[in-house]
Image (cartoon, rainbow, N blue to C red):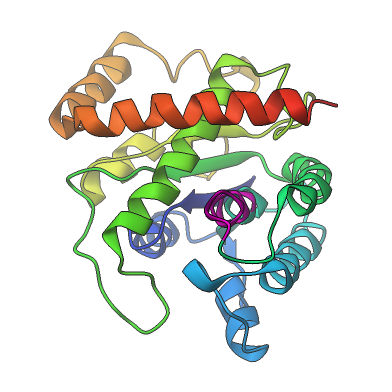
Amino acid sequence: MRIAVCGSANLGKSTLIQDFLQEWSMYGFEKETYRDIIVNKELKHSKETNKETQKAILDYMVNTLDQFDSDDKVIFDRCPLDNLVYSLWACDKGISDIDEDFISECIPTVRESLTKLDIIFFIPRTKLNPKIEDDGMREVDEEYIKEIDTLFKMLQLQYQQHPQDNPFFPREDSPALIEVFGTRPERMQMIRLYLDADGDLMGGEGGTSDIFNPENLDMMEQILKEQNLAKEEEEEVKKQLEAIKKFQKENKS
C-alpha cells in the first residue's frame, strides 16, 4: 500500500503520520521530504512560490513515487495533488510567474503520478485542527491556510462527483481519496476502517464492503456532526467549485 497524507498547512499532517507509524510500524517513510528540497535549493515557497519551486517539488515527488510499487508499504508527507493545489492558488492570485499554461503543463504529470498511490488521506480544516505553530517553515496565515483548504475541498468534490470526467485524476487506477478528521484518536479510528492490523486494505479479497457497515457509518456521521463546519466555508467551496468547473472545461482532454 502506497499512502499519502495531504491537506493545507498546519492541520496536523505530520502528527497523523507519526501516529500512523506508531500503529503500522511496518510502513516506511521517506527520509527526505519536499521541505528538504525547499531548504537545500533555497526556494521561495508558500505565498511566495513560483514556477521554479513548484517544478522542483513536483519532480521530486514524481521521482520518489517511481521508487515504489504496489507491494511496498510506505506513507508520504504530501503528494503531487498538493503541488497542484498550491500552483492553482498562485495562479488564481496572480502573484508569481505561475500561469494557466504552467498549470496545463503540470496536470498530465500530476494525473499520471497519482496512479502510483493507493490511498490519499485528506485532512480538512475544521475547528478541531491543532493550534497553528510557527516553526519557520510552516505557513501561519490563517486566511491563506483556509484558501488552500478550499481548493483541496474543491478537488475533492470534483473527484466525488465526476470520477470518470475529471482532468486532475486518472480515469483508471485512481487512488482512493479519503477524508479523515477529528481529534488524533478519531483520525486514527477512521483510518482503521480502511486498514487492518497488517496495514493492508480492510476487506482484502472481499473488497471494501466491510468498511461501510452501519456501525462504521454511524461513527463517521457522529464525528462529522461534531465538526459542525461553518456555513461560510461551505459557500466558499461552492464558489470555488464553479471556478474549477470553468477551468475543467477549458482544459478538458
Bounds of the magenta segment = 84-94
Q: Residue at x 24, y 19 (%)?
A: 221
Q: Quick one: 101 or 215, which is closer to the camera? A: 101
The residue positioned 55% from the left and 33% from the top of the image is: 155
Whether residue 86 is in magenta: the answer is yes
Q: Is residue 108 above or below residue 4?
A: above
Identify the image quadrant of the N terminus. Answer: top right
Relative placement, left or right, of 175 versus 13 is: right
- The dominant secondary structure in magenta is helix
Q: Is residue 203 visible?
A: no
Q: Residue at x 69, y 44 (%)?
A: 117
Q: Position of residue 98 (x, y in %)?
A: 68, 60
Residue situated in front as seen by the camera: 166 or 26 = 166
Residue 57 on image: x %, y %:
69, 68
- Find out whether residue 90 is within the magenta segment: yes
Task: Work out whether residue 217 can be spotted.
Answer: yes
Q: Quadrant of residue 180?
A: top left
In this image, 119 relative to 157: left or right? right
Q: Where's residue 165, x and y in %? A: 73, 17
Residue 70 at what x, y percent from top left?
A: 75, 44
Report the quarter where the C terminus lies.
Answer: top right
Total numbered labels: 0
Q: Residue furthest front?
A: 94
Furthest residue in direction top, as rendered: 214
Residue visible at 37% across and 12% down in the picture:
213
